[in-house]
Image (cartoon, coloured by chain):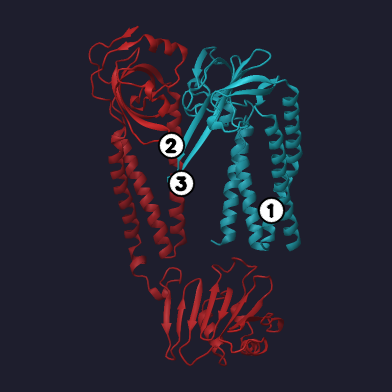
Chain colours: A cyan, B red
Amino acid sequence: MGWHGCLALWCAVFGALALLGYGRSLAGVTRAQRAVRVTGRIERVREPRHGSSGSDGIPVVVSFQDPSTGQEFTVTNDGEHGDRVSTAWTGREIGIRYPPGRPHAFKFTGDLQAGRRGLGGPNCAVFLVYAGLVALAAVDWGWPWALLGFGGPWTLCGVCYLPQNASELSRRIDTLSSSGGVPGRVVAVLRDVRTDEDGHTTTSDTPVVAFTTHEGTAVTAYCSSGLPDPAGSYGRDVTIHYSPADPAVFTADLAAEHRSRTSDLAWGVVALLIGVAALVVGAVMV
Amino acid sequence: MTITTGTPPKPGIQPRPGTSLTLARGLVTGGVIGTSLAALVVGAVVNSGPLFGTGSGLAAGYGLLCFLGVRRQRDREAAVAPRTALAMIESMDATTGEPSDVPVRFDLSVVPDDAPGFRVEITQAINRVDLPDYRPRGVLVVQYPPDRPWRARIVKRPTPEWEDRVAGARLDTVPGPAVARESQEGCSFGLVALVGLLLGAAAVVLLFRADLFAQDTAALPPSAAQPSVSVSSTWSSTVETSASGTVTLGPGQSFLDQGELRRAVDSLTKGRGTRQALTVVVQDRLLSIVFTPTPTGTQALQFDPGSLPYERFPALVQEAVTTLGVHSPQTWQLSVDRLTGSLTIRIGVTGPGGSASLEADGQGRVVRRSPVG
């Protein structure tokens, strides 16, 4: 079997998988579509212990009701239960999903609407089919077609993403700047130490801040950026700017937000230029 | 609140059913792996497409079946709601040296509300900061699947209700031994799978032993046979595989001699249909041709090695050696390829003063000169 045969088989297999996935999604039988999605409520929040692991999230007690039986459940975020809870306050709503009839297998989710149709797999298969077609074109007609195949979608994504990201960042900074700051305090610094196969150790320190909004909401949240010397920040007093509509949007350093916006935009432009360059070079060489 | 246990209970665990089924599954799994691997290898050696395809299909099909089976089993296991119970630490042994999460081996007395208590040994990673919370005779909360209690795990963040129960609990030791772990099945499963693997491979080899061992090496395609080596009476040697061919001349001979190059190329291509080449490289006494793997592969780069203007090669080499400013040339190399789209003949000449090159088209007409300097 030559190149053509292999690539044709590749495209056929992933094309069939994509069709199967889209068919299942249309029929409404994917796992994601069958999952029960409910909104839970955080009943209690505890400050994490200083020095403990950051991977467990902020300790919370959550209650939710199974719509099929009406039974109330009270659970905690112990062990592997979906998304890490990184910002919490009593009364905050939190997404929960689980397979039908299995509320004990609940998972926390930050976005209840994400992945509702179960199209992640089929979309991935379509991408692999596209990659196979680009490889086929590159083998048959020359490598510049690989540049065109890569540069086209990359540039399209960049063109769509860049303005959207820019306006989102601007909106975020405007919101944070307009709100008056409130005092906060670093109540813990969580430390995760990982050692790779070569014996190299990586340490990650995540400060946890606690602050009370003007509306009286006591928020406990991971503050992974904006604090200088995070490892030594335990007990430090900070000023928190937050969005009154959603205290999960906050910062401990407005200036850092501005810097972050600039670097984000710069990276977006560089990525877009790479795509355009690939397109131009590919078009010239074809 | 005190929770005590009555008479020393049995672990409360039913023996795992289907042990013989598990062993049979191991045998089949090993058999399929052995059969498919042997089919792939034997299919490649005897050049049998159907056998090769059967091996691949068998492996893929059984892999898919296993995947679906494992997924179904996990679904079944996940459908069972875990049981939550109080437990007491009988002993614990923490591994030292870990920087963050420390694996700790716990010996626990587990006391469920509505089932007999049992002993279990588990190992769980505990963050170094949280280690002081765990001490012998301490009470904690565990969760376990009712049918697999050896998979118990400590609940580090119990609900308020269970926190209250822990605060007021005093438990008695449950007599051992600890409940059996399912890993005891693993050894026999592996052994049976190995037997199945060997049986499957042996079956395929035996079935195709005639093709394997009675194969005439000369009749084998170059890919399945050893590279063929021949030495002619005029002291030139030829080494051939399915992907390349090399002819080396003996002392006193040269590929610039009249007709020598054409003869050598013909010896590599004659009687093998239309073999397409990717590159042809010629030095004074060495000819090397890289062939395309299949006649249809990489069409944009391939060319017929028999169609090259070999009669022009000596003149082109002579021109490169004498007109490009390389004084006392020591080596030359001629290469032919279609990397740039059209057929290109390049002659590189190297001497003490530097290198130079000359390019010609598919008809042997000079199109570019790159002199020294």
User: Is B361 on the left-hand or right-hand side of B294?
Assistant: right
What's the residue at 45%, 88% (across, down)?
B250
Do residues under tags 1 and 3 come within 8 Å of each other at their CB atoms?
A: no
Marks 1 and 3 belong to one chain:
no
| Extreme residue toward the top, this view | B1
Q: How dense is the environment of label 2, judged by Cα within 10 Å: few (below 14), some, or many (20 and up)?
A: few
Q: Secondary structure at mark 2?
A: helix
Query: How far apart, in angstroms, are the residues tagged by discs 1 and 3?
Result: 33 Å
Do residues under tags 2 and 1 come within 8 Å of each other at their CB atoms?
A: no
Task: Name the spot of residue B365 as percent of width and height, x first.
Answer: 71, 84
Q: Quadrant of residue A85?
A: top right
Residue mark closest to the camera, 1 vs 3: 1
Q: Secondary structure at mark 1?
A: helix
Query: How far apart, in angstroms, are the residues tagged by discs 2 and 1?
Result: 38 Å
**Chain ID for label 2?**
B
Task: Name the spot of residue A154 as percent of width and height, x first.
Answer: 70, 47
In this figure, which residue is indicated by the disc labeled 2? B69
What's the residue at 63%, 46% (across, down)?
A127
In this figure, which residue is indicated by the disc labeled 1? A149
Query: How far apart, in angstroms, are the residues tagged by discs 3 and 2?
Result: 12 Å
Residue flagged by tag 1: what amino acid is it?
Answer: Gly
What's the residue at 46%, 29% (across, down)?
B75
Q: How dense is the environment of label 1, judged by Cα within 10 Å: few (below 14), some, or many (20 and up)?
A: many
Marks 3 and 2 belong to one chain:
yes
Q: How dense is the environment of label 3, judged by Cα within 10 Å: few (below 14), some, or many (20 and up)?
A: few
User: Is B219 on the left-hand or right-hand side of B285?
Assistant: left
In this figure, which residue is indicated by the disc labeled 3? B61
Count of numbered badges drawn on the protein:
3
Q: Secondary structure at mark 3?
A: helix
User: Which image quarter is the N terminus of chain B in?
Assistant: top left
Would residue A36 be visible to someone looking at this image? Answer: no
